[in-house]
Amino acid sequence: MYSSSKGFTLIELMIVVAIIGILAVVAIPLYQGYVAKSQVNRAVGELGAYRSAFEAGLAHSKPISNETLGYTPSTLTTGNLATEIATVNADGSGHLEVTLGGKVHPDLAGVVIRFERSTVGEWRCEIDPSSAPGWHASYAPGNCTVL
């Protein structure tokens, strides 16, 4: 009598588990890097949105504060409504600045994102990762300078 075996052998199952383990070892760090990069991009985009309100305040000679900017603290930053994100100098230059923290990837905690405004109204994005030892250059958006 001939009986056919159905199913997988133990060796076949062990090989499949080993392959899945190898794929996970490669994929998880890549995924974490993508998460960190997307969080930096999100924080840069959120901060950049306040540039137009900053310009409008300067154009109308109004004081610039979190309230006049319409600032809403992000879950990715350490900011709150009591801590001003804008600084204006007498010559018209200034900056918008936030520090990453809160629900951000652990490698990004402490990174400072700043939009610097020149006296002629040109904006420049700067990132200071000196307080974040886990920072990788790949996290930086292409339009920002890493200090």
Image: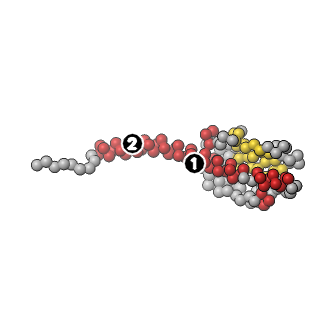
Question: Considering only vertical position in the picture, is 133 above or below 68?
Answer: above
Q: Which mark is residue 19?
A: 2
Task: Locate residue 14 relative to residue 84 in the image: left or right.
Answer: left
Residue 87 has which mark? Answer: none
Task: Name the residue nearer the viewer: 21 or 4.
Answer: 4
- In front: 70, or 20? 70
Amino acid found under the numbered disc labelled 2 = Ile
Q: Which mark is residue 35?
A: 1
Measured along the vertical axis of the image, is residue 48 above or below residue 67? above
Residue occupying the point 74% across, 58% down: 71
Residue in view at x 62 percent, y 49 percent: 39
Task: Report x, y in % for residue 139.
Answer: 62, 42
Q: Which of the image's four quarters has the C terminus? A: top right
Give whichever of discs 2 and 1 has the lower sequence position: 2
Instruction: Say what amino acid the circle numbered 1 marks.
Output: Val
Q: Is residue 33 left or right of residue 95?
A: left
Left or right of 52 in this view: 92: right
Q: Position of residue 126 (x, y in %)?
A: 72, 42
User: Callout 1: few (<14), some (14-19), or many (20+) C-alpha neighbours within 10 Å?
Assistant: some
The answer to which quarter of the image holds residue 63 is: bottom right
Q: Quadrant of residue 84?
A: bottom right
| Residue at the image position 48 percent from the left and 44 percent from the top | 27
Q: Report the front residue among 99 and 37.
A: 37
